[in-house]
Image (cartoon, rainbow, N blue to C red):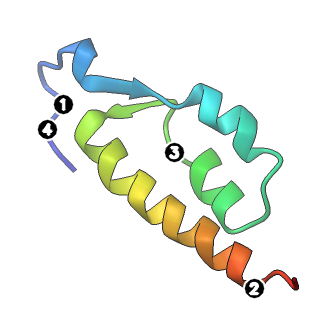
Amino acid sequence: MQNLGKVNMSDMVNIRPLKTIAIKLEDPLKTLILSEPDIISREEYLIKVQAWLRILNLDKKEEPA
């Protein structure tokens, strides 16, 4: 994780709206998103959202047609 000594707020992402959606999701994605801080760096968000989307796609592949 990066040092957040002097942070420009425009470099931060508020994921509270995402958390309101995550409440309706299944685990493990729900737990992963809800365990994150409400505000994370843009860099961290870009990395994590890729992982969250992979998990979401895995869940969809497991659902019966």
- Residue 6 location (% of width, % of height): 12, 19
Spatial distance from mark 1 to mark 3, Cα to Cα?
Answer: 16 Å
Of the residues under marks 4 and 2, which one precedes in the sequence? 4
Of the residues under marks 1 and 3, which one precedes in the sequence? 1
Q: Disc 2 designates what residue?
A: 62
Classed neighbour count for the residue bearing mark 2: other residues with Cα under 10 Å, few (<14), some (14–19), many (≥20): few
Q: Which mark is residue 12?
A: none
Spatial distance from mark 2 to mark 3, Cα to Cα?
Answer: 25 Å
Q: Amino acid at mark 3?
A: Glu
Instruction: Please indicate whether residue 52 sits to the left or right of residue 45 in the image.
Output: right
Q: Which mark is residue 3?
A: 4
Say which of 55 and 23 sits in front: 55
Of the residues under marks 4 and 3, which one precedes in the sequence? 4
Say which of 50 and 4 sits in front: 50
Q: Dot 4: what SS? A: loop
Of the residues under marks 2 and 1, which one precedes in the sequence? 1
The tally of labels here is: 4
Spatial distance from mark 2 to mark 1, Cα to Cα?
Answer: 39 Å
Q: Dot 1: what SS? A: loop
Q: Which mark is residue 4?
A: 1
- Residue at (31% x, 25% y) in the render: 12
Spatial distance from mark 4 to mark 2, Cα to Cα?
Answer: 38 Å
- Residue 39 location (% of width, % of height): 43, 28
Q: Disc 3 designates what residue?
A: 36
Q: Quadrant of residue 7?
A: top left
Which residue appears farthest toward the right when viewing the image?
64
- Residue 21 location (% of width, % of height): 73, 39
Q: Dot 2: what SS? A: helix
| Quadrant where the C terminus is found in the figure | bottom right
Q: Amino acid at mark 1?
A: Leu
Which residue appears farthest toward the top when viewing the image?
9
Q: Dot 3: what SS? A: loop
